[in-house]
Amino acid sequence: MGLFDVFKKKDGEEQAVVVPQSEESSLQPSAPSEESLEQSESITAEEQTPQSAEGKKSLLGRFFTREKKETLDKGLEKTKQGLFAKIAHTVAGKSTIDDDVLDDLEEVFITSDVGVATTIKILDRIQERVKKDKYVGTSDLNDMLCDEITQLLADNNNADMEDFHVPADMRPYVIMVVGVNGVGKTTTIGKLAYHYKQAGNNVVLGAADTYRAAADEQLEIWGQRVGVPVIKHNMGTDPASVAYDAVASAKAQGADVVIIDTAGRLHNNVGLMRELTKIKTVMKKVLPEAPNEVLLVLDGSTGQNAFEQAKQFVAATEVNALAVTKLDGTAKGGVVIGISDQFQIPVKYIGLGEGIEHLQIFRREEFVRSLFGK
């Protein structure tokens, strides 16, 4: 029985539609989303060339390459410039780190959207360092801040994800993506699919946002671009049934990763939040451990609003991973530090630009070093 036969339904019922990997024609929806069309770059023929499983799962991507470093530095440029300017102003004309410098640093970090609680932790660490080292000049301040913020994130168990490899005993690995409208959910899903595929994984997408007219069309565009199948139903059908079929499809064809798109929702919309519970329950009928990851996507350019969204979503549903997008267009990238510190939920991915390669795994040390120009 073929994959299409598994999901063939009676006339008049919704039908799962698969966009095959071999299909190369582009879908042109009547009202394409700005998110899907503007926040992407063309995938070169070289990127779409099939590779052996061993080649794809080689050391490529396991190291923080020069290209990734350049992308990170460029994506954080606005935040870095703002932070450096504020710190430079704080220490101007001073030779040691005294109470006045610490008070000014508090304002610097709070206005950089690091958050009050995390700012206090950072300053406490700096005070302890100054006491221990007896004399610390302002010239050492950037190095000290870089070290202490990196250690703060490490102490909070924000372990770095190594790459996009999926352990054999966790396949298919199911990612359910949640968040409010406009944060870049669908774009993030498309880029995740690309990176997981480049790492040697077979990927299936599930279009479980059945409320917004352009949602499934956006996901189909990404499926075509990346070369992965997309499971969808008709507009307005039960999102849980789409998620069920996507997971069942992935299991039937031996796929490695399933990424489920869901409707944008506010945390206080009780009906939609309950729907997430239903989607999770239905997927468990196919794979008891699904979803392995409930990924909350946040728009980093909103600063403290992203922090508040994270707080409310974490309280309302079982979020266990975070993605912070649009960091290249804002000076509020410090919010990543506060979110990483406060929620004890790993920031796994960061969005640093429009290109498909501009989604990166969040590596705390490289992130902090980039912020401080290292």
Image (cartoon, rainbow, N blue to C red):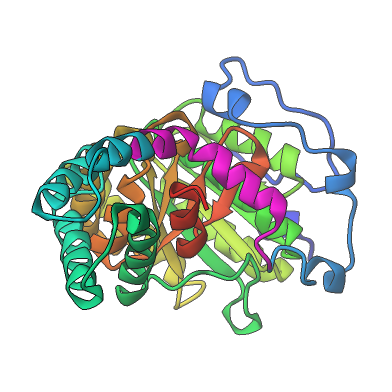
Based on the picture, tell me whether residue 68 belongs to the magenta stretch: yes
* Residue 22 in the image, given as x and y percentages of width and height: 86, 46
Q: Residue at x 26, y 38 (%)?
A: 92
In the visual, does 304 lie left or right of 369?
left
In the visual, does 213 lie left or right of 197?
left
Q: Which quarter of the rendering shows the N terminus?
A: bottom right
Quarter of the image where one finds residue 262? top left
The reply to whether residue 266 is visible in this rendering is no
**Above or below: residue 58 compared with residue 24:** below
Q: Nearer the viewer, residue 82 or 189?
A: 82
Q: Nearer the viewer, residue 347 or 332?
A: 332
Q: Which region is colored magenta?
A: 63-83
The reply to whether residue 177 is visible in this rendering is yes
Q: Nearer the viewer, residue 324 or 265?
A: 324
In the visual, does 144 lie left or right of 97?
right
Q: How many marks?
A: 0
In the visual, does 128 lie left or right of 302?
left
Q: Residue furthest bottom?
A: 169
Q: Residue at x 72, y 27 (%)?
A: 27
**Above or below: residue 288 compared with residue 50:** below
* Residue 76 in the image, given as x and y percentages of width and height: 48, 40
Based on the picture, tell me whether residue 74 belongs to the magenta stretch: yes
Q: Nearer the viewer, residue 215 or 333?
A: 333
Q: Residue at x 60, y 71 (%)?
A: 172
* Residue 294 in the image, given as x and y percentages of width and height: 40, 61
> Taken as a whole, is the magenta stretch helix, strand or loop?
helix
**Above or below: residue 25 compared with residue 201:** above
* Residue 5 in the image, given as x and y percentages of width and height: 73, 57
Q: Residue at x 65, y 70 (%)?
A: 165
